[in-house]
Amino acid sequence: MKWISARRAACLLPLLSLPVAATDLQELEKQVMEAERAFAKTMADRDLEGFKRFVAEDAVFSSGKSLRGKQQVVEAWKAFYAKPTPPFSWKPESVEVLESGKLALSRGPVYDPKGKQVARFHSIWRLEAPNTWRVVFDFGVDVCDCKAAEEAGKPS
């Protein structure tokens, strides 16, 4: 077996960072969309073990106080999986993948148990192995009832 020389290897290194082709990006976006849907399904199925598989070891989840690391995230989220009925649900609306093909952003609505939108989520996914995406950053933003807020601000 021939070994590649250090000089040749150095010449090939820039090729490793070339942007992913548009069709490959579409495939990666599809993978992340499917991963996000499966991630959300863990809540509907009350599957904490499944949830764990989607969280990166160095993840940061933030909706107020930041949770750092998989262990802290899972420990805090146990409460969401404890009862028979999910306290909320979410679904992805859009996914964007960096041209490197290594990071992706998913976004979408978060619903209360009655189906009313109460927040929006934003998750950053990292490709950790072929076809294996994990969440590295996750944060939610409450949805403002702008009409009610506007009405509350009007003088009577």
Image (cartoon, helix red, strand yellow):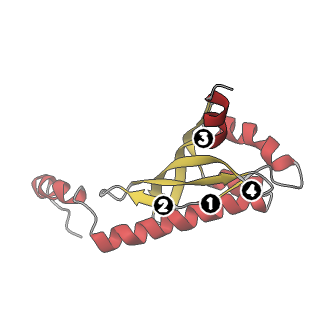
Does the rendering let one see residue 143? no
Q: Residues within 10 Å of mark 1 (few under 14, many from 20)?
A: many
- Neighbour class for label 3 at 10 Å: few (<14), some, many (≥20)? few
Specify which label sits upstream in the sequence, 4 or 1. Answer: 4
Query: From this viewpoint, which residue is outermost toward the front?
Result: 156
Residue annotated with mark 2: 94
Instruction: Give how far across and how far down residue 4 sits, in percent.
Output: 17, 61
Q: Mark 1 to mark 3: distance in Å?
A: 22 Å
Q: Which residue is mark 4?
A: 43
- Under mark 2, the amino acid is Ser
* Image quarter hosting the N terminus: bottom left
Give the secondary structure at mark 4.
helix
Give how far apart the Cα atoms at labels 1 and 2 are.
Answer: 9 Å
Left or right side of 87 for 59: left
Alpha carbon separation for disc pair 4 and 1: 11 Å
* Residue 11 vertical placement versus 67 (above, below): below
Whether residue 113 is visible here, answered yes or no, is: yes
Query: Considering only order in the chain, which callout, 3 or 1, is on the residue closer to the N terminus?
Result: 1
* 22 over 15 or under it: above or below: below
- Residue 143 against residue 21 in the figure, above or below: above
Q: Which residue is mark 1?
A: 91
Q: Quadrant of residue 143?
A: top right
Give the residue at mark 3.
146
Q: What amino acid type should be assigned to the residue bearing mark 1? A: Lys
Q: Position of residue 87 (x, y in %)?
A: 80, 49
Q: Are marks 2 and 4 in contact (CB under 8 Å)?
A: no
Task: State the SS at label 3.
Answer: helix
SS label for mark 1: loop
Q: Amino acid at mark 3?
A: Cys
